[in-house]
Amino acid sequence: MKKVNILMCTYNGEKYLREQIDSIIDQTYENISLFIRDDGSNDNTLSIIHEYTDRFPEKVHFLDSEKHLGYPGCFWDILAKCPPADYYAFSDQDDIWDERKIEYAVDKLTDFESNMTNKKGIDIEGEKKRQKIGENGNIPLLYIHDSTICDKDGNAIGEHRLSSFGELKYNNIVFYNIAEGFSMVINNPMRDALLGGDDFSRTIPHDQWTIWTAFFRGNIVYDSRLLAKYRRHEDTVTITGGGRTSLIKSWIQNEIFGTWFHSLCKRILYLTEFNKEYMTDGQYNDLRMLAGDSSRGNYFRRLFYAKRLRPSIGGELALRINFLLGKK
């Protein structure tokens, strides 16, 4: 039976933490271990964690850390320090998982891996270089499921579906994060690939870097079932599901007048160099141009780039304004 490590980072999460841990403890898949890393909470989060480690010593484990790393450093730290397993699932501190989430993830991943055995390589719609697969079909895999967006009380207010973004292409995954970490499960080759970067890669959000790595170095295994409630509340950091007003505010304050776009361009340029051997020449050149490579003539190529880069009109407009301003 495959072993699954569930990796949770906490910070002042006392309000919703028990409900999330309970949904993990109640998983139908039995061979799981929950590893929790706290990032310096000053509420009752630590006492709640130790309550569960005492009640379920074989299943819930606390990874002590002296440093406050913030996000995303806390997730990179726990991924590096947790014991080995067959699969690894990322967990927020305030969501609610469907009881069969891990069972479905293991089924999907093992099925994909068995189908990969003895194959020499793969192509994704002719867009990706053929991958080097080990003797046992080892390839970095990322499982992503769909989720229900809910309010602070767990009431459904929307859905996040990967299929709504259409066909995944290299140009429409770099300027928009297509999935959140809580919906992801990865295999061991993916863990090795993620931890194989340098210090800069550890400054990139773990879910974004995982998606990029899976697209260029491995494969994405998609599950259309709604297998978690993604809670949106007053302390939520990300803007996903936050409503149109939050999106518009983020586009104006963070993307056009803030530092978000500059940071993302730096990540994309790093991505192109780190994964160059896994990209076609067209992918490499396009992404460098879009990230603001200052080669001659790239300003107008970038400004009038014909392919859609983000799913919403507002998000696309914010990008094009940055292109117009020549920001990078």
Image (spheres, rainbow, N blue to C red):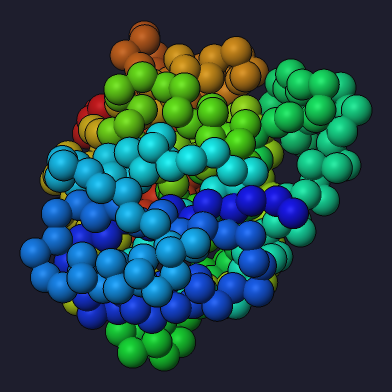
Residue that extends furthest to the left in the rendered view of this protein: 42
State whether residue 151 appears in this view. yes
Residue that extends furthest to the right in the rendered view of this protein: 118
**Image quadrant where one finds the C terminus:** top left
Picture quadrant of residue 325: top left
Residue 236 vertical placement versus 296 (above, below):
below
Q: Nearer the viewer, residue 164 or 73?
A: 73
State whether residue 162 appears in this view. no
Q: Nearer the viewer, residue 95 or 223?
A: 95
Q: Nearer the viewer, residue 16 or 121?
A: 16
Q: Position of residue 94 (x, y in %)?
A: 34, 72
The residue that appears at 46% across and 59% down in the rendered structure is 34
Residue that extends furthest to the top in the rendered view of this protein: 296
Q: Position of residue 119 (x, y in %)?
A: 89, 28
Q: Position of residue 255 (x, y in %)?
A: 23, 47
Q: Nearer the viewer, residue 305 or 66?
A: 66
The residue that appears at 85% across and 42% down in the rendered structure is 114
The residue that appears at 80% across and 29% down in the rendered structure is 137
Residue 19 vertical placement versus 209 (above, below):
below
Picture quadrant of residue 16: bottom left
Residue 195 vertical placement versus 187 (above, below):
above
Q: Position of residue 282 (x, y in %)?
A: 60, 19
The residue that appears at 57% across and 59% down in the rendered structure is 32
Picture quadrant of residue 273: top left
Direction from residue 62 to residue 112 in the image, left or right: right
Direction from residue 239 to residue 56 in the image, left or right: right
